[in-house]
Image (cartoon, grey):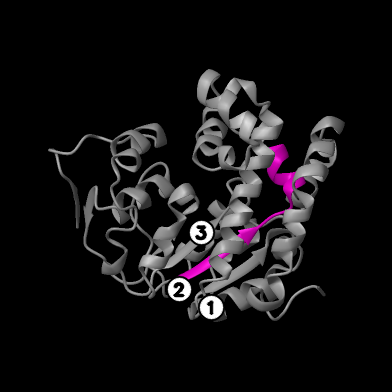
Amino acid sequence: MQAIDTTRPTVRDWAGFDRHIRYRGVPLFGRLGAFETPILVSGCQRSGTTILSHVISDSPGVSELPCEGDSELHGALVLCGHIDYRPLGRHCFQTTYINNRVSEYLGHDHYRLVWVLRNPFSVVYSMLHNWRRAALTRLFFACGREELLPEERRKVATLGCWTVGRTRQACLSYNAKVHQLLWLSQRLGPERLLVVDYDELVQAPEAMMAEIREFLEIPGISARAGQLLPDSVGRSRCQRLREALAVETLCISNFNAARRLLKRFGPAIGPSR
């Protein structure tokens, strides 16, 4: 059913993906058109997109992509054509990795995109304390550095990313992903884009998952939806004061702008806006 072309370099991690695929200009969605109404799940990294992708993939009417290890990386290799795969049924792909290639979403029109929006306090905390340093560096170079002030960009270009503190890297990367959502919202209609607030999803999972199911037009949602635990909402409470102040200063206005999209692109059922 699937095969790896031995003439292609082996890609085992995201650094290899960037080196052999992204930076060589390979279309990241080159094979998306081969799939039947594919489901795409995106958002800022550390926003709950992985568990939601797994819940959807495990649901009736969706065929789970066979893989071992990092499911997002495997799906990325399938979508760009690096791994040969013959689609059987409908599939769900986690696509947070698209990053600075966000315009590729506009090259196709037969998919459904669920964008997970999570409050910046939780996201930045997770980036700084639950994520590998290399992962944040890759995201910052792919997205966050575009949010730098001109003099900061010059320093980064000359001396490297160490000239920008990790908290600022995380905040600017978060903002960049929010700006991608705002950009997409101007180009995609509510029939193709659903924006889900992660905190609302874990606080009212039954109602929110029912709306996601209706948007995706699938008959049911996997029992794995129970893994969306409410206690994950409060993980930023132990955030350091300096981190919290940086998030408040840099990210909250962008988060609030993105939350306004819920009136048009959000679920019809859920906590009051």
Q: Is residue 25 above or below residue 255?
A: above
> How many C-alpha atoms fall within 10 Å of the one at disc 1: few (<14), some, or many (≥20)?
few
> How many C-alpha atoms fall within 10 Å of the one at disc 3: few (<14), some, or many (≥20)?
many
Range of residues picked out in magenta: 112-126
Numbered disc in front, either 1 or 3: 1
Amino acid at dot 1:
Gly
| Displayed quadrant of residue 63 | bottom left
Q: Position of residue 256 (x, y in %)?
A: 77, 60
Q: Is residue 122 magenta?
A: yes
Q: Which residue is mark 1?
A: 189
Q: Position of residue 123 (x, y in %)?
A: 69, 45
Q: Which residue is rendered at x = 82% and y = 38% of the image?
A: 244
What residue occupies the far right of the structure in this picture?
Answer: 241
What SS does tag 3 mark?
A: helix
Q: Give the distance between the C-alpha atoms of the residues marked 1 and 3, in whole angstroms.
A: 21 Å
Q: Which residue is rendered at x = 15% and y = 44% of the image?
A: 5
Q: Is residue 74 above or below residue 165?
A: below
Q: Which residue is mark 2?
A: 60
Q: Give the distance between the C-alpha atoms of the residues marked 2 and 3, in whole angstroms.
A: 13 Å
Q: Is residue 270 above or below residue 138?
A: below
Amino acid at dot 3:
Ser
What residue occupies the far left of the structure in this picture?
Answer: 7
Q: Position of residue 264 (x, y in %)?
A: 66, 78
Q: Which residue is mark 3?
A: 53
Q: Is residue 169 magenta?
A: no
| Displayed quadrant of residue 184 | bottom right
